[in-house]
Image (cartoon, helix red, strand yellow):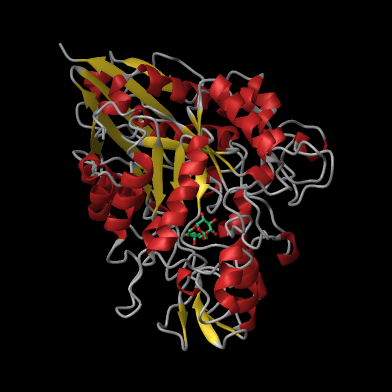
Amino acid sequence: MAIMSDDAWWRSAVVYQIYPRSFADSDGDGIGDLPGITARLDHLAELGVDVLWLSPIYPSPQDDNGYDISDYTGIDPVFGTLADFDELLAGVHARGMKMIMDLVVNHTSDEHPWFVESRSSTDNPKREWYWWRPQPATDWQSFFSGPAWQLDPATGEYYLHLFSRKQPDLNWENPQVRTAIYDMMRWWLQRGVDGFRMDVINMISKDLDAGVFLPGPRIHEFLAEMHREVVAPHPDRLLTVGEMPGVTPEQARLFTDPARAEIDMVFQFEHVNLDQGAHKWDLRPLELLRLKESLGRWQVALADVGWNSLYWNNHDQPRAVSRFGSDAPQHRVAAAKLLATVLHLHRGTPYVYQGEELGMTNTPFAAITDFRDIESINYHATAVASGLPPDEVLAALRMMSRDNARSPVQWDSSPHAGFTTGLPWLPVNPNYPEINAADQWADPDSVLHHYRAVIALRHAEPAVVHGTFTMLLPEDPVVYAYTRTHGAVQLLVLANFSGAPAAAAVPGVAEWDAAQLVLGNLAGPPEAPASTPLRPWEARVLRRVAD
Ligand code: TEU
């Protein structure tokens, strides 16, 4: 089995996440679908991304927008058919891109035949495929709906669900479960997919007696077994990325150490929890110092072993430019480009979430009836019932709701931004006439063309992929600065995370004044020396070669 060496293909790759429900609708039902994605593949190929990650497209009651799967080897009719899938995958491969699937195997839908059988009787052969107890075995709270143990009247026992009541947790202690999952994964690999994004994969090992699941005692054993059973027969072909809420840098070193043959990289959550207090709705101001400290610590932790995923947002997080940048009209374009520059020049594999390449913003939700996400709707009900002022609850939802990321992609300035000819399942952001792909393809100074440039830089410049990372100005409250060094080549990244000018006061910055400006995000004198003060939301990448 090949141990990934320094030149694993995914170290120089950029991944683009598609949330199919909101990407592109081909049949006018207001919901994105597979033919809609196929019709937009040139947008992605021209952007320059290497891998597409599809959020779930399997048959599902859609209680959690497809993260509640009732058939692992099918396509939900709302998204199309397996023939549509094969056509999409062929189009992806024909353009030299790869495609990975969302693997949601911590839980199934309660409508999956496995669970229907399991709940039918206490002695059903599939009873032990899930977690059943006569009484709640832990005091765990679920992420979406109250206590994590649900009484099932059919047998008078309780089943475990870390997410919604319609998402019962699989029992990975049961080897029959693991075998069934590995068989399903092989089925998709035989169909041609190129790997998996693994949903909350660090939750699959649970020790109910000890009351732990993050991570559970057998997580490394299970991931190594999965790698051995499914991934190892396909050396140098696949990408496996584990979504791991709560994972620490030390744990990530173990999970992504190629010598351990578990997974290639992880999604960690530290930087997307910095603007929260006790929970995600308890909003706190985001401080750049803490952001730099967190991302910098992850760079150090994985500098010599393992690998980082790099992201600002996804289908669970608010829009990057609204959260980490500025969506004020006078700053949005510069801030969106700055965020792309800062993230993509880090060491790791960057992920672009659909619409991020356009600088799409959070949605101006007016009322709770505007939301669709189970997490937001359930939080609103619980919070208001507990006595929190509805306006405060709504303000938190407007900032943090997952629906911010799920408004349809803004393709052009036609009705519903060209997403659908019908009524979209979630309204299009009203700013689509100002922010859409068609206009940005025609504008060389657009956010879109900046993403193309930063992706192209990753493909052209080995220092971006392999260079060592050194954080600079750790105490500067508005300037994010770091270097990447690879042999004689050194890159300096300078970014002003503020709406006011800021000094680029890195030590020895004047020695960079003769350096080449390989990427900037603001129009103006291309030869601006490094030591020139940074304009509001200005980012610069300079390159020099040591003598
Ligand atoms: O999300 C896992 C996870 O940690 C979520 O609870 C996330 O932190 C939360 O949604 C942020 O508010 C994964 C999927 O990405 C998410 O869409 C699913 O709802 C969840 O697992 C259950 O499958």
Closer to the camera in the image, 281 or 317: 317
Residue positioned 20% across, 26% down in the render? 508
Instruction: Return the residue found at the far top.
Output: 547
* Residue 194 placement (x, y as % from top left): 46, 34
* Residue 97 placement (x, y as % from top left): 51, 25
Viewport quadrant of the N terminus = top left
Query: Compared with residue 152, is residue 281 higher up or lower down, i.e. above or below?
Result: above
Closer to the camera in the image, 447 or 529: 447
Residue positioned 26% across, 52% down in the render? 249
Residue positioned 26% across, 40% down in the render? 473
Closer to the camera in the image, 468 or 541: 468
* Residue 9 placement (x, y as % from top left): 35, 27
- Does residue 376 appear left or right of residue 510 in this picture? right
Q: Quadrant of residue 546?
A: top left
Closer to the camera in the image, 413 or 509: 413
Is residue 45 among what the camera can see?
A: yes
Query: Compared with residue 25, is residue 142 higher up or lower down, i.e. above or below?
Result: below
- Does residue 240 appear left or right of residue 282 in this picture? left
Viewport quadrant of the C terminus = top left
Instruction: Return the residue found at the far left.
Output: 547
Q: Quadrant of residue 402?
A: bottom right
- Does residue 422 appear left or right of residue 212 in this picture? right
* Residue 200 placement (x, y as % from top left): 44, 57
Is residue 410 among what the camera can see?
A: no
Query: Compared with residue 450, is residue 60 higher up or lower down, i.e. above or below?
Result: below
- Does residue 43 appear left or right of residue 11 in this picture? right
